[in-house]
Image: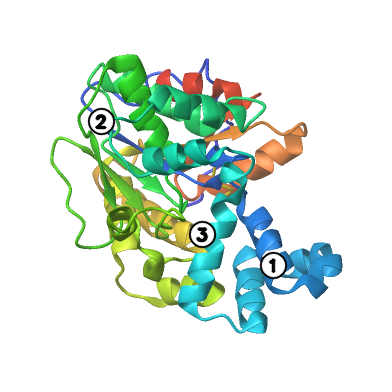
Amino acid sequence: MIIMAKQGLTPRTALNLVKRDHTWALCVGSGISYPIFPLWDGLARKIVHKFVPAADGSFDDLSKKMNAEVLLQAATEMAGKDHKTFAKDLADTLYEGLFEGLAAPDVELVKKCLTSVPGIRGIDWNRYLTIVQGKSPVKTTAMSLAESILRLKSQNRAPSSILSFNAEMLLGSLMNAVAHESYGENRKFFDYMIEPTSFHDKDRIAYYFCHGVMPVPGTWNSARSLFNADEKLVFLENEYLQLANSSYSWQSTAFINTLSSHVVYFVGLSFVDPNIRRWLAWIQKERLKSLSKHNPKGVVSTSHYWIEKKPASTVQQRMMEASVSHLGIRIIWIDDWTEVSAALENGIVV
């Protein structure tokens, strides 16, 4: 069956996409945390600079021939790094921009906020918000999403789950900060899911780290133990390939279960990850097969939405729409990232 790509929506036209009795979920990538945390290409550049400084001058040429995972793999092998050393260096590199320029008390506060829940006493969440906002010239998409999630939560329309392909906890910590400062919420309302044995309370949002999570450098042993899933990181090429060739992984199970039973909004992803595309293609194939059998005259070709900034070229817009239509994705075009909250909230019936 050949299905033509639908033209993208806008925040004004992306209305009532999630009916009142339907559930929804959120899937996020590194774009939501930029510029506080680097994008994957930027992270790869920093790692190459640290591990193989002689390759700095040719990085632009190399990046045209290798994606971020391959660059990370090559730099790690050339530097002779084992997995444990690589994970530590990656964590230090990932967090250095957030810690840079902060006084020692503020660094400690940031570490606590990243690894704590709202009810912990003695944490200045307002100061944390000020520090984070001061690290970006504009409001980050992660902050906008945190505010949207809490607004929807106050109307009993919070996401059922969050799928994250990041290895840091910025969005989670901002959710906790907004919950505490704006809603007086002091209870844990989401669970980080970092491995197959992670526990999920039925009344909380399941927050999946699909590519593992980095322990925050310099945190106490209890926090490092709670958030340390660096052995499950999926950053190097061989890790991507092992995940792609695995007939079963908890990441694929979490992703497929979420996409199969919820309307999902994607934010901050580029849709070049081969595993994401493979999982989406499988889900969409099964969905169309089922719809064709039960309702052959009324097949709805898309069921999930990608919030993305609109390119200047109409041809590029149409190409991007076509690149994800067969995966069951329709794009909601925004002119600026300040519109991400409207693009999300307008579609969810409360």
Q: Which one is nearer the viewer's eye here, 96 or 26?
A: 96
Q: Is residue 287 above or below residue 134?
A: below
Q: Give the x, y percent position of residue 22.
A: 24, 29
The C terminus sits in image quarter: top left
Q: Mark 3 highlights which residue?
A: 91
Indicate the amino acid at tag 1: Lys
- Identify which residue is drawn at 55% across, 66% down: 89
- List x then y, in percent, for residue 194: 31, 57
Q: Quadrant of residue 302?
A: top left
Residue 255: percent from left, percent from top: 34, 53
The three-letter code of the residue at mark 3 reads Ala
Q: Which residue is mark 2?
A: 121
As measured in the structure, the alpha-carbon distance from the residue carrying label 3 to the one carrying label 2 is 27 Å
**Residue at horizontal 73 percent and vertical 74 percent from the top:** 52
**Res. 114 image quadrant:** top left
In this view of the protein, which residue sits in the foreground, 283 or 119? 119
At mark 2, the secondary structure is loop
